[in-house]
Image: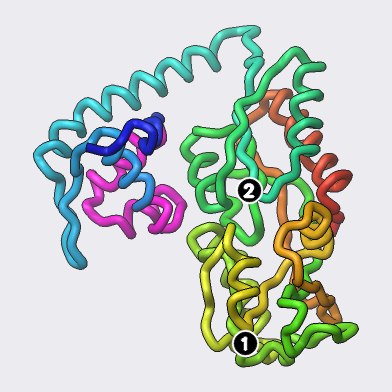
């Protein structure tokens, strides 16, 4: 039995993901159909199984099949999704109805100040927000499924059926331990990093950005000895290994200001070859004025508080 405190609450999107896999009987095809990558889809199915405390699929390297519990869930899931969609369509179709609540997802590194600005602006408009933390891959799938109204996505991503704000960017430099052989230089070339381990976020979080960064690294002469995935443990891994990672000077100075992971240093890359690019995104057909306001407020707050710059 899974302890209650470990379970993830079931949402309508979990049922949409389940039905896609149940109909395709193939995680890769289901992920493509949902416009998401396979790892986050597999995780959401596992979350649903933990919540229900049953196995819904028998999996092997070459075969996916519904279990008896999965077969029983299919018709009920279809009814639940259909009922939800009908209710949503009914509300959206009501003349003069203006939603007063909007669902927004942010990347994990978004500052508190950005969220405060959004909540304050929405309250002034007599509206409220449901805020969530999610990766680019998760947000992309949630936008297309109609589970969130606005997201903040890292480029590149598929823009199909989406409307994006102007691109914003931040320049990346190199973070190392203070006693690293490369520490103390005024700047570095990507080729200077060749042979060192790279600590980097898992590809499943933002596949396009991950591939872009690695492609630029290799084109610049940096072929990592190995790639160590990490998010919360990034700076701990740097201290434990002769490794490097990439981050912005603003993010690094913020970490330093609160005294987290002392003994690290940030060095700029000559020519600024690496950038994070982001946009505030909603569904293409969403004409709700509250959505437009939310996109504008977030884009402005990202520039003001999190040091994103216009391309």
Please identify the dominant SS of the magenta region: helix
Left or right, residue 66 beside residue 27: left
Residue 74 in the image: x percent, y percent? Answer: 20, 33
Q: Nearer the viewer, residue 251 or 14?
A: 251
| Residue for point 72% across, 58% down | 260
Q: Quadrant of the N terminus?
A: top left
| Residue for point 38% across, 33% down | 5
| Residue for point 65% across, 7% down | 96
- The answer to if 88 sits in the magenta stretch is no
Left or right, residue 247 beside residue 310: left
Residue 40 in the image: x percent, y percent? Answer: 42, 52
Question: Which element is circle 2 on?
Answer: loop
Q: Which residues are magenta?
A: 13-41
Question: Can residue 63 be seen here?
Answer: yes
In which quarter of the view is residue 268 placed?
bottom right
Residue 272 in the image: x percent, y percent? Answer: 83, 76
In which quarter of the view is residue 311 placed?
bottom right
Question: Which element is circle 1 on?
Answer: loop
Q: Which residue is mark 2?
A: 108
Q: Nearer the viewer, residue 198 or 74?
A: 198
Left or right, residue 54 beside residue 39: left
| Residue for point 79% across, 52% down | 258
44 to 82, vertically: above or below: below
219 to 28, vertically: above or below: below
* Picture disc at residue 196: 1
Q: Nearer the viewer, residue 36 or 225?
A: 225
């Amino acid at each position: 039995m899974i302890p209650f405190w470990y379970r993830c609450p079931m949402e309508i999107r979990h049922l949409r993901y389940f039905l896609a896999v149940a109909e395709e009987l193939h995680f890769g095809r289901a992920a493509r159909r949902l416009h998401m990558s396979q790892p986050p889809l597999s995780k959401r199915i596992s979350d649903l199984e933990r919540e229900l405390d049953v196995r819904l699929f028998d999996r092997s390297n070459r075969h996916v099949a519904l279990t008896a519990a999965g077969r029983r869930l299919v018709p009920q899931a279809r009814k639940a999704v259909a009922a939800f969609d009908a209710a949503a369509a009914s509300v959206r179709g009501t003349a003069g109805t203006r939603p007063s609540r909007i669902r927004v997802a942010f990347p994990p590194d978004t500052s508190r100040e950005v969220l405060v600005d959004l909540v304050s602006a929405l309250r002034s408009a007599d509206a409220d927000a449901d805020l969530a933390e999610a990766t680019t891959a998760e947000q992309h799938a949630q936008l297309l499924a109609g589970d969130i109204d606005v997201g903040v996505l890292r480029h590149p991503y598929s823009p199909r059926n989406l409307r994006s704000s102007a691109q914003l960017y931040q320049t990346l430099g190199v973070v190392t331990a203070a006693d690293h052989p490369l520490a103390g230089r005024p700047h570095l070339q990507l080729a200077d990093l060749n042979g060192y381990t790279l600590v980097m976020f898992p590809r499943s979080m933002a596949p396009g950005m991950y591939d872009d960064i690695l492609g630029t690294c290799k084109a610049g002469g940096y072929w990592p000895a190995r790639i160590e995935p990490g998010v919360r443990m990034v700076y701990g891994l740097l201290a434990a290994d002769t490794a490097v990672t990439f981050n912005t000077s603003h993010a690094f100075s913020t970490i330093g200001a609160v005294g987290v992971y002392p003994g690290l240093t940030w060095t700029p890359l000559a020519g600024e070859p690496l950038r994070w690019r982001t946009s505030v995104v909603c569904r293409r057909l969403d004409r709700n004025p509250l959505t437009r306001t939310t996109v504008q407020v977030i884009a402005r707050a990202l520039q003001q508080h999190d040091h994103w710059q216009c391309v």
